[in-house]
Image: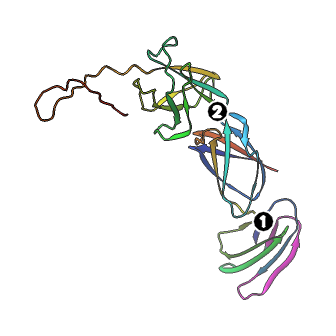
Amino acid sequence: MKEIIFKLIGYNPIYIKILDNNHNTIYNEKIYNNRIKLCLEKNKAYTLIATSNNRILKRVFLVDDKTNKFIFSFYNYRKITFLLRDYFYNLPIKRGKLILWQK
Amino acid sequence: MAKIININNGQGSESLINGSYTVEANVTGYENSTINPNTISIVEGSNTYQFTISATGTLTLHVTEDGTSAGTPIVGATFVRTDSTGTEYGSSITTDTNGDAIFNNVPFDATNAPIVYYKQTSSDGDHEFVSTVQQATLTESTSTIEIQNAPGATRTITLTDANYTNLPIESGTLTLNN
């Protein structure tokens, strides 16, 4: 039994479709929590298509006998650079912190 | 949940998702409430965001012939803020009739003030000055540093005839432009 876990913002339903490597649909459900458990054959690749809150996730994953949990994220994390300068002198601030609170 | 971005030499990085954020600053020596902007929207396609912050301290450089508070003031000497390597930032400040060059909006802190670098870029033409980078830390909101610009030393200039060795020129003037 393999567990597929989704990371997403809020508590939105997730529409999940999983295809095997012959393009056969082996799972097609709407779920209301963020995880499902499935029996998947090892050493096979599967295609996951998940949608939630207008975000689409499409991933191909390989099932082996070591991995029991597959975690997929709807988040779009990426590296953001923050520049901080003195307003009056345009000097780069040597040391400090910015604290960001998500609204 | 808060994301903390450590700033070193003017920049820091963090992995974030798109969204709207309120921004707070924690910069020793600066007025943290002046962080600008204080809200941002992280959007697709933009991975660099710029902020400014300002301080409220005042650094007065008092320039006199003897480097004391009662000395003869030097008017027209210029200073500029720099980093530790001497790169200049902001506008040049000129000493007034009291010999004061006043840098406003300079960071200060009682225990952990950031270093303020500056250098003198000129004097009034009749006085010597040190042009290397100087530094100060302000532990109070106002601070005065006494700076000496000593009168230029008397130099002996000789003018002789080019065709008659050592024959001094009786009278005339030489004009030296710095």
Q: Which quadrant holds residue B19?
A: bottom right
In the rendered image, is residue A40 in sight?
no
What percent of the width, then of the height, locates residue B6?
A: 63, 44
Q: Which mark is residue B28?
A: 2
Magenta span has B11? Answer: no
Bounds of the magenta span?
A: A19-37
Labels 1, 2: one chain = no
Quarter of the C terminus of chain B within the rendering: top left
Furthest-top residue in view?
Answer: B70
Mark 1 neighbour class, 10 Å CA radius: few under 14, some 14 to 19, many 20 or more: some
Q: What residue type is labelled 1?
A: Phe
> Which residue appears at 80% of the width and 84% of the height?
A25
Circle 1: element type: strand
Q: Which quadrant holds residue B9?
A: top right
Q: Mark 2 lies on which chain?
A: B
Q: Which quadrant holds residue A54?
A: bottom right
In the depicted structure, whether residue A71 falls above or below residue A64: above
How far apart are the alpha carbons under marks 1 and 2?
40 Å
